[in-house]
Image (tube, helix red, strand yellow):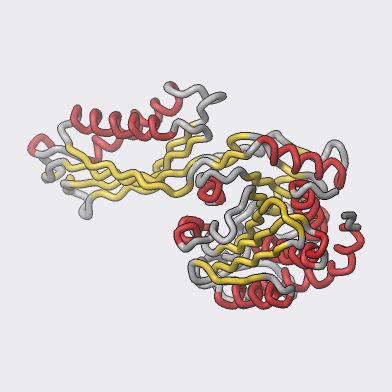
């Protein structure tokens, strides 16, 4: 089976571009992607795929090849962000306060392009391709899809997912084997003291003073107790609330933040965090409660699938196209939830940073723009990765 992928992409390039711009102009927040999901569903039905909804606005299309083989899944995201766009593009957001400021509009259009190319060759395809379009990635929508049977009928043998990425130049990709995106857990610490008047602090116990020592202790924990090369660990306090009157010491204080680990020993980090907080509070005559909840788990790339992606990239974009420096990050992606079910996967970043086109703003920024040359590049990389995994080309 030989597919001239590049020529076939050229034939649908304008269509992919139009889809991306249409989605960009009509962004929708997580689990509210009604218009976007309908667009995706209509496109997949038009290609003759077996299509179903999952977790409300999630869409899954199954392409069954004429020959037996393995099953591979691709994942793209549907949701936008609660950001007001400040670009002067003719297809800027028409939904006030909502913007595709991360590139999910691109990822969806790219995946539809891959579906169109592969669907045209279903008679020659050895295996099955599952196209999963996920809602609410920004707030961890993967578990809802899994609970609703996204990985059943059929169950994938492998997963590929790509993401357009402005920090990497157009024409390169970023990927590493093993851990690539950190686990992200969120904590809420409530410190209980004894309220009193500010002019008589000895008559109470200040949770504010205690919180100051708790912050010092967790800063020391993350900087001195973990090898930054082997166990990258980041603890950040993002919210502190205590008191409602300037001359009184309050009875309680609440701290919230995140614990991020770019290694698989996060449970031990959580236990140590809890121990330190409780011991410091006890030392300063306070009691406390500590809640830790999961945002994202560690995303770790399968080495064999990583090698497929790197091989395809070097063939398509050149021998020096694979970037590894700065690719591992303390941010998370809930694609990890699919990997955690025991299915190997590879998540890679497709560069679209181009100063000449203004596509270098950070993701989640009101000025975020895309070098649309990335669309054709990404369709080719994803199509070839699928074909390579299925034993074609």
Quadrant position of residue 127: bottom right
Relative to residue 325, is residue 335 depicted above or below? below
Residue 196 locus on image (x, y percent): 11, 44
Res. 334 in view: yes
Q: Which of 335 and 46 is in front in this view?
A: 46
| Residue positioned 81% across, 55% down in the render | 380
| Residue ID at (74%, 73%) | 47
Q: Nearer the viewer, residue 6 or 119?
A: 119
Which quadrant holds residue 110?
Answer: bottom right
Viewer-closest of 330 and 153:
153
Q: In this view, does 318 lie above or below 368?
A: above
68 sits left or right of 289 in the view: right
Image quarter (top left, top right, bottom left or bottom right) of the N terminus: bottom right
Left or right: residue 297 compared with residue 207: right
Q: Residue at x 64, y 59 (%)?
A: 76
User: At 70% from the left edge and 75% from the top edge, which residue is drawn?
Assistant: 43
Residue at the limit of the structure toward the left, as seen here: 203
Residue 251: x and y, percent?
16, 46
Please give the count of numbered marks on the rendered protein.
0
Specify whether residue 97 is in view.
no
Expressed as whole percent of the image width and height from the top left, the position of residue 108 reads 67, 64
Left or right: 53 with respect to 41?
left
Q: Give the percent coordinates (x, y) of residue 252.
A: 20, 47
Q: In which quarter of the image is residue 174?
A: top right
């Amino acid at each position: 089976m030989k597919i001239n992928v590049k020529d076939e992409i050229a034939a649908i390039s304008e269509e992919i571009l139009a889809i991306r711009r249409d989605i960009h102009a009509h962004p929708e927040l997580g689990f509210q992607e009604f218009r976007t999901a309908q667009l995706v569903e209509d496109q997949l039905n038009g290609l003759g795929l077996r299509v179903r909804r999952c977790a409300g606005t999630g869409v899954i299309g199954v392409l069954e090849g004429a020959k037996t083989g393995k099953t591979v899944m691709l994942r793209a995201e549907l949701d936008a962000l609660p950001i007001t766009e400040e670009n002067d593009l003719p297809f800027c957001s028409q939904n006030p306060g909502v913007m595709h400021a991360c590139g999910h509009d691109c990822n969806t259009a790219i995946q539809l392009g891959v579906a169109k190319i592969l669907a045209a060759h279903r008679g020659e395809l050895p295996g099955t391709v599952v196209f999963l379009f996920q809602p609410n990635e920004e707030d961890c929508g993967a578990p809802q899809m899994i609970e609703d049977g996204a990985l059943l009928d059929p169950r994938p043998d492998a997963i590929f997912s790509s993401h357009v990425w402005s920090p990497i130049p157009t024409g390169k990709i970023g990927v590493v084997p093993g851990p690539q995106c950190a686990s992200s857990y969120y904590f809420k610490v409530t410190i209980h003291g004894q309220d009193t008047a500010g002019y008589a602090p000895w008559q109470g116990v200040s949770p504010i003073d205690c919180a100051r020592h708790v912050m010092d202790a967790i800063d020391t924990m993350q900087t001195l107790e973990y090898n930054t090369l082997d166990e990258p660990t980041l603890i950040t306090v993002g919210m502190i609330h205590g008191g409602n009157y300037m001359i009184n010491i309050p009875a309680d204080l609440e701290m919230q933040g995140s614990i991020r680990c770019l290694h698989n020993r996060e449970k031990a980090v959580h236990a140590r965090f809890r121990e330190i907080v409780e011991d410091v509070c006890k030392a300063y005559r306070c009691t406390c409660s500590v809640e830790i909840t999961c945002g994202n788990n560690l995303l770790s790339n399968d080495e064999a699938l990583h090698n497929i992606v790197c091989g395809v990239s070097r063939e398509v974009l050149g021998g020096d196209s694979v970037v590894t420096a700065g690719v591992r990050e303390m941010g998370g992606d809930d694609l990890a939830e699919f990997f955690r079910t025991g299915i190997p996967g590879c998540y890679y970043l497709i560069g679209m940073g181009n100063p000449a086109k203004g596509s270098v703003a950070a993701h989640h920024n009101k000025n975020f723009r895309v070098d649309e040359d990335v669309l054709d590049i990404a369709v080719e990389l994803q199509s070839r990765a699928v074909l390579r995994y299925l034993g074609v080309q």
